[in-house]
Image (cartoon, rainbow, N blue to C red):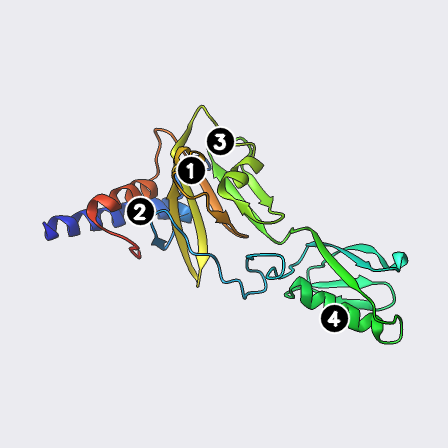
Amino acid sequence: MRNVLSILLVSMLLLLSACASTGTSSGQSHSSIVSNEVVGNKLPPPDTTSASGAYEGASDYRIGAQDLLEISVFGVQDLDKEVRVNSNGQISLPLIGGVMAGGRTIPELEQDLAGKYASGFLQNPQVSVFVKEYASQRITLEGAIVKPGIYPITGKTTLLQAIALSGGVDDKIADLGGIVLMRQIDGKRMAAVYDLRAVRRGKMEDPQVYGDDIIVVEASGSKSAYRRFIEAMPALGVFGLLF
């Protein structure tokens, strides 16, 4: 029995390798973005300590390039301003000029700005920072959906909400049991498969998605080699296999 399983696994790996090397077109097999590790139907969150990582809440979010910030100073309306973080992570504000915002949390930036305004300009300034657009946090949606593309997420976003951003699944061809969520963790791309019907009924977790996640909705009747491999795993008793 062990020999049979080994042969089956080798065959699947060879099939995946062949598909990845030939490449595919959008909406068909997605072996060109095949993951390094399969983790069933649950993914760990990304590293929230990185400057571009996702976040658990507003205080943990680290500002990134192209984010749109709304900055206000209590009682000084002339200093209220909307600024977009440039590619170097900097913003420019009245009186204090250029400030590094990229990689900082919102409380860190608020404290820094208050300190700069207090240095010769204002007495005990109260600065508030609100992220109006999380432009640096983007997700990719591919496959059998209405509007495939790259979308910004503007706060905590679940899988269902992410799919809604793209106009929903294509009801004519989408395989609702073939929603693949891919994520980069510690340099490895990991993936999990979700059944949209089960998620909608509350029988399966509606996972939070993070910046740089990739969501692929498989087309019914044209499952990729990658998806077939995942579906075969439970029957083979394989979990978290690296390839």
Q: Secondary structure at mark 1?
A: loop
Label for residue 202? 1
- Asked if residue 131 lies left or right of residue 209, the reply is right
Q: Secondary structure at mark 2?
A: helix
Q: Tag 2: residue type? A: Leu
Q: Which mark is first along the chain, 4 or 3?
A: 4
Label for residue 112? 4
Label for residue 169? 3
Taking the spot 53% from the left edge, 62% from the top edge, the residue there is: 48
Foreground: disc 4 or disc 1: 1
Residue 64: x and y, percent?
64, 59
From the image, tell me which residue sits under label 2.
16
Figure quadrant of residue 60: bottom right
Disc 1: CA contacts within 10 A as few (<14), some (14-19) or many (>=20): few
Foreground: disc 1 or disc 3: 1
Is residue 5 in sight in this rendering? Answer: yes
Q: Tag 3: residue type? A: Val
Q: Tag 1: residue type? A: Gly
Q: Secondary structure at mark 4?
A: helix
Figure quadrant of residue 176: top left
Circles 2, 3 touching at the beta carbon (< 8 Å) = no
Q: Which mark is first along the chain, 1 or 2?
A: 2
- Asked if residue 17 lies left or right of residue 149, the reply is left
Foreground: disc 3 or disc 4: 4
Circles 2, 4 touching at the beta carbon (< 8 Å) = no
Q: Which mark is first along the chain, 4 or 2?
A: 2
Q: Tag 4: residue type? A: Asp
Q: Relative to 1, is 195 above or below?
A: above
Is residue 100 in sight in this rendering? Answer: no
Q: Nearer the viewer, residue 18 or 79?
A: 79
Disc 4: CA contacts within 10 A as few (<14), some (14-19) or many (>=20): some
